[in-house]
Amino acid sequence: MKVLLDTNIILDIVEKREPHYHDSYEVFLLAAKKVVDAIVGAGSITDIYYINRKSCSDSEQALNSIVNLLKVIIPVDTKADDIRTAIGLGFPDFEDAVICATAIREQAGYIITRNIDDFSASPVQAVTPEQFLALPG
């Protein structure tokens, strides 16, 4: 199964943000064990680097975090059609719409996020890490 990880989930892992770290990391471990294919929009990678670099004040450490993530999480490009799809989704937040459009194109089974309300109109079901870990099978 393919799942798209929202930026906040990856930041939970990279920055060990409590109380969210544990469940987000458990999802990451499922990807590391090849139980799921975890993808992330390539545009999110720059956001993750920027936020992490500010919090750790070390650009090399922030870049190493990205390198290590990419050993497990697969970045996927945003395509022109994703932008067109996102516009048509009518989400209040355009970035979330682009994430949703990418999940649609990539045929992701779930969008894993801590902000499920932001994806209430999504045709791809949004779940929290905790909810995802509780799914059967």
Image (cartoon, grey):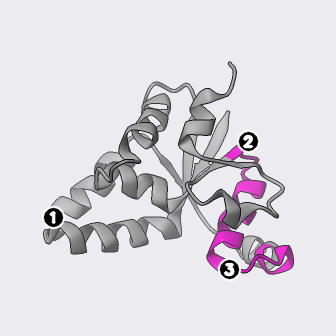
Q: Is mark 2 on a helix, strand or loop?
A: loop
Dot 2 surroundings within 10 Å: few (below 14), some, or many (20 or more)? Answer: some
Out of 114 and 46, give the one closest to the viewer: 114
Q: Is 76 situated above or below 22?
A: below
Q: Which residue lies at the image location 77% right of the left edge and 61% below the top edge?
A: 120
> Residue 79 placed where, x, y %?
68, 70
Q: Name the residue under label 1.
A: 60
Disc 1 crowd rating (10 Å Cα; few below 14, some 14-19, many 20+) is: few
Dot 2 corresponds to which residue?
109
Residue 26 vertical placement versus 121 (above, below): above
Q: Main secondary structure of the magenta part?
A: helix
Q: Label 1 is placed on what type of residue? A: Glu
Viewer-proximal residue, 125 or 18? 18
Q: Residue at x 41, y 72 (%)?
A: 47
Return the x and y of residue 82 as percentages of the image width and height: 74, 70
Which of pointers 2 and 1 lies earlier in the amino acid sequence? 1
Residue, disc 3? 94
Q: Where does residue 62 sit, x and y in percent of width and height?
A: 23, 63
Measure the alpha-carbon separation of dots 1 and 3: 30 Å
Which comes before the other along the chain, label 1 or label 3?
Answer: 1
Identified by mark 3, the residue type is: Phe
Q: Is residue 93 left or right of residue 16?
A: right
| Span of residues in magenta | 86-110
Q: Is residue 128 magenta?
A: no
